Amino acid sequence: MAAIAHRERVLERVVDEHRRRRRHDFWTLYLTRVAVLVALLLAWQLLSGVLLDPYFFSRPSLIWHQLVLLVQSGRFTGNVLLTVEEAFLGYLLGTVAATVAAAVLGLLPRAYAIVEPFLLAVYSIPSVAIGPLLIVWLGIGIDSKVVLAAYFVFFVVFMNGVSGVRSVPRGWIDVARVMGAGRGQLVTKVVLRGAAPHFMTGLRTAVPQAVIGAIVGEFISSQRGIGFLISDASARYNTAGVFAAISVLSILVLVMAILLSGLSRLGARRAG
Amino acid sequence: MADVSANGRGGAPRAEVVELVSVYKAFVAGGTRQAKLALEDVSLRVPRGEFWSIIGPSGCGKSTILNLIAGLSAPTDGTILYDGRAVRGVNTDVGYVTQDDNLLPWRTLQANVELALELRGVPAARRAERSRELIARVGLAGFERHYPAELSGGMRKRASIIRTLIYEAPVILMDEPFGPLDAQTRLVLQDDLLRLWERSRQTILFVTHDLVEAIALSDKVVVMSAGPGRIKHVYEVGIPRPRDVFHIHQAPGFSLIYDRLWADISGEIAMSRRAPAGEAVRTREAEG
């Protein structure tokens, strides 16, 4: 009895230590991050006016002031939501198209060999060149921004996806084929699932790409959105306004990335 | 008991389930662009319900034979017959235990074992019943919800074997399934395999490089020579069943068959050592 109780105590101690260490790691990580951010802002604030010309580089207090003005003017929510909507729809469109394309082309090496140079050619078109075209085709409304965001997203997800599909071990596929898997089953149960880690990398890196796509679209031609706020402020030489809009953008991308990683963790648990 | 027949087909004629008729397989090596013969004039007739092992030096085309029977690749010349019909395309009547366990890392042990039944549309309740039974029989009960990465090498091997046995394919191909395991685990798994097989009596083709393993498990042992792969001899292992793999070396007739096989194989190994480049020479010597 005593021996068993002792064993329990030993095991408990290890679990306890492990839990404490993890909690500790978690908090030190986040506290350090916050400290770094605060230090950067503080340095900026203090150096502005001494080393940095506030006319060009602004300073955190002015940027904060601009943010407050923006919210008070009532222009904040509508513009942010529009950019979020464009980025979100573009992300959906881009990822779905890229996943289908990657699955099909990853499994058909000959077809992939044929289209690869064309894909690279399309990929090499600078966004500033394709943006105006999309606006000519789709108008200055939300559609052109969504497609531009999708274009940015597509290649990131597609490239990762294709390499994921191709890295699925031959043995997994052969074993499933011998077991009697049909083509569809092979794709859904082995290939896409096996390529999932690569796809996840693509999906994660595509989040900022979607926002960039939407912003570029707004930059080229728009009366609304965060991109418009940036171009509008910079046209008036309002550097604090530009920085204010940029900081909104960064926070937006951060929130989206956190949501996505939470979602993927949930998905991983579900799939188990 | 130690009835060693030099040329395979001993005993009364039986229905062959797998048949290779003068099969040739050639590959083009990527670097040299030259064709290389992996199998030359290989003929084999495996009767239903027997356990056959294939041994030979590495590179003698043992695995190639299994791939051909599974229909994963096609012969360059000759025919593979399964149940009297030529194999064209993937042969889903066989189960294939590959050298790597090839368990899907995102599936739990149980989900991996059930994969074949899932692909065949067997309802979940029936699947779970079958998989639980097999999992228990190889001593993996309690690990159903573990992922492959959380299992030891021996456990993964067991899992990969029962996931192949679960759909009761009439023929099971096994490619050095116990290769990378430690000696104790090997013995235990050989014992597991024999027990499973003695219930089901499927036809098994078992590739190995371990002489004792081949003798302990098989009815017949096929000895191959390398460069290009040919069948040298087919030996009958006369040891009665059920067998005790842990004491197989004490079984009557063991040393006789072991010595015969070893004499045959050691010649092959010496040959492939002496002439690493000269394939033509090696082949001629092997024939002599």
Image (cartoon, rainbow, N blue to C red):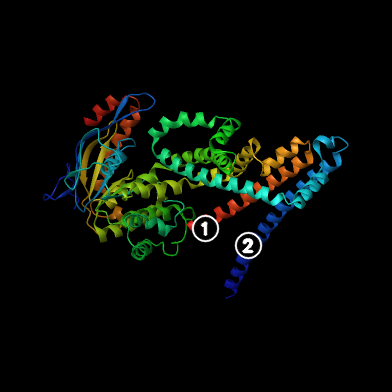
* Residue in the foreground of this view, choosing between A62 and A217: A217
In this view of the protein, can residue B139 be seen by the observer? yes
Circles 1 and 2, Cβ within 8 Å, touching? The answer is: no
- Residue at 59% over, 51% down: A261
Kind of residue sitting beneath label 1: Arg
Q: Earlier in the sequence, mark 1 or mark 2?
A: 2
Which residue sits at x=18%, y=44%? B85
Q: Chain of mark 1?
A: A
Dot 2, how many residues are within 10 Å of its Cα: few (below 14), some (14-19), or many (20+)?
few
- Whether residue A267 sits left or right of residue A223 in the image: it is left
Please rate how many residues cluster around mark 1, counting C-alpha atoms within 10 Å: few if below 14, some from 14 to 19, many from 20: few
Image quarter in which the C terminus of chain B is found = top left
Residue farthest toward the bottom in the current orientation of the protein:
A1
Residue B99 seen in this snapshot:
no
Is circle 1 on the same chain as circle 2? yes
Q: Residue furthest right?
A: A50
Q: Quadrant of residue A230?
A: top right
Disc 2 on helix, strand or loop?
helix
Where disc 1 sits, the SS reads: helix
Point out residue B74 in the picture as x, y percentages from the top left corner. Answer: 26, 37
Q: Position of residue A65 (x, y in %)?
A: 81, 48
Relative image position of residue A131 (x, y in whole percent): 58, 34
Is the residue A141 above or below the residue B196 in the image? Answer: above
Give residue B173's position: percent from left, percent from top. 29, 48
Label 2, on which residue?
A14
Looking at the rendered structure, the kind of residue marked 2 is: Val
Nearer the observer: mark 1 or 2; the answer is: 1
Write down the residue under mark 1. A269
Label 1 and label 2: CA atoms lie apart by: 25 Å
